[in-house]
Amino acid sequence: MNRKSFLKLGSLGLASFKNITLGLSPSIKPIVVSTWDSGMPVNAAAWTILSVNGSALDAVEAGAMHIENEINCCVGLGGYPDRDGIVTLDACIMDEQSNCGAVAGLEQIKHPVSVARKVMELTPHVILVGDGAQQFALENGFKKEARVLSADAEKAYKEWLQKSEYKPVINIENKTQNGPFAPNFFEDGSANHDTMGLVALDGAGNLSGAVTTSGMAFKLHGRVGDSPIIGAGLFVDNEVGAATSSGVGEEVIRICGTHLVVEFMRQGLSPSQACKRAVERIVHRNPAKAKSLQVGFLALNKKGEYGGWAVQKGFVFSVKSSLENKIYPAKYSL
């Protein structure tokens, strides 16, 4: 390297010079990535915190709360009920120090992700469920909402009752009628679910993640999927990266999906390739069954690199940083 080249590199700053000489790409931070096209407004809510040097933990909670406020039949109290006509909510949150909290089967509380954070911060436990989760929420200042189905959820439930069949539809989350928050019901009354999972890297280089969902539509009362389970629907390792998932939660639980994705990144795989390996684990376990289900993984590493992979075509994810604000289709295995 001659003197002229050295001085030119010096203008990039010491950190950039170090990355160039080591052959590394500079880190992209802050950044937030989330599942589905409905993640665009979720990312925008998280970005209001990340863009002013706020923490990734505060950002992912804000993003999850945003979609919990929407009446979208997928997340929050406007979501589809179980087969008994009751809306139950699941959520979890995890920070850069492996602190985590979750709630499952929570009824009549508007912001389950914030209850999950209180579980993380105020108790020695990780997960509270059902009546206990609701009691904890009320004791910590959350308001008990009326048990009333949203208009779209009530219509879909009445249609479902005509046959009482449980037939999840692949990628229903991405086939809404009028945009990301439109009702997700079909002529035959069948419906599926949606999950909002997001992970973020803040300006200090710390990772956090959150997940919130109303779960599978018309599920058995008491059913819990992967969303509130740390290591299944969400996992964060501040030395490596973070991952979240969407799709048939039972399949994610069976392989401890997001923990697996993070461990693949620890071994040196890119976020996209790590997600691919986890999907392949699901497909390999039962190839015939995999043809009729959808699971998508989304991952973010410490350098701000991101990627996703799904069992089937149709899974998309949203990205927001100072460089971009886009929706990307994930690659897929089948």
Image (tube, grey):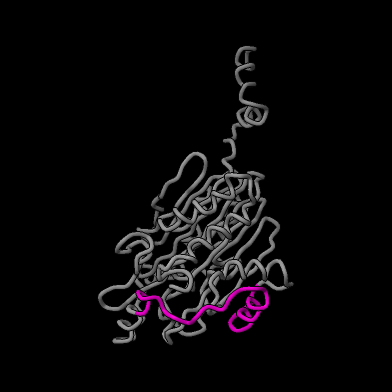
The image shows residue 282, relative to residue 316, as above or below, that is: below
Q: Residue at x 56, y 71 (%)?
A: 112
Determine the residue located farthest toward the top in the rendered image: 3
Residue depicted at x 67% and y 27%: 14
Depth order, front residue of 224/289: 224
* Residue 301 placement (x, y as % from top left): 58, 49
Q: Residue furthest right?
A: 124
Residue 273 showing in the rendered view? no
In the displayed structure image, the side of residue 96 where residue 226 appears, left or right: left
Residue 121 occupies quadrant: bottom right
Does 24 sit above or below residue 204? above
Residue 78 on image: x %, y %:
43, 73
Residue closer to the observer: 2 or 60: 60
Query: Residue 114, percent across and down?
Result: 60, 67
Quarter occupied by the C terminus: bottom left
Residue 312 vs residue 279: left or right?
Answer: left
Total numbered labels: 0
**116 relative to 211 in the view: left or right:** right
Q: Is residue 220 magenta?
A: no
Q: Which residue appears at 38% of the width and 69% of the height?
A: 293
Q: Quadrant of residue 93?
A: bottom right
Q: Is residue 135 magenta?
A: yes
What stretch of residues is rendered in magenta?
127-154
Can the viewer see residue 3 in this picture? yes
Asked if 116 appears above or below 333 in the picture, the reply is below
Residue 160 percent across, percent down from the top left: 32, 82
- Which image quarter holds the N terminus? top right
Query: For the view shown, which residue lies furthest in the left direction?
Result: 187
Is residue 70 depicted above or below 167 in this figure? above
Q: Nearer the viewer, residue 123 or 135?
A: 135
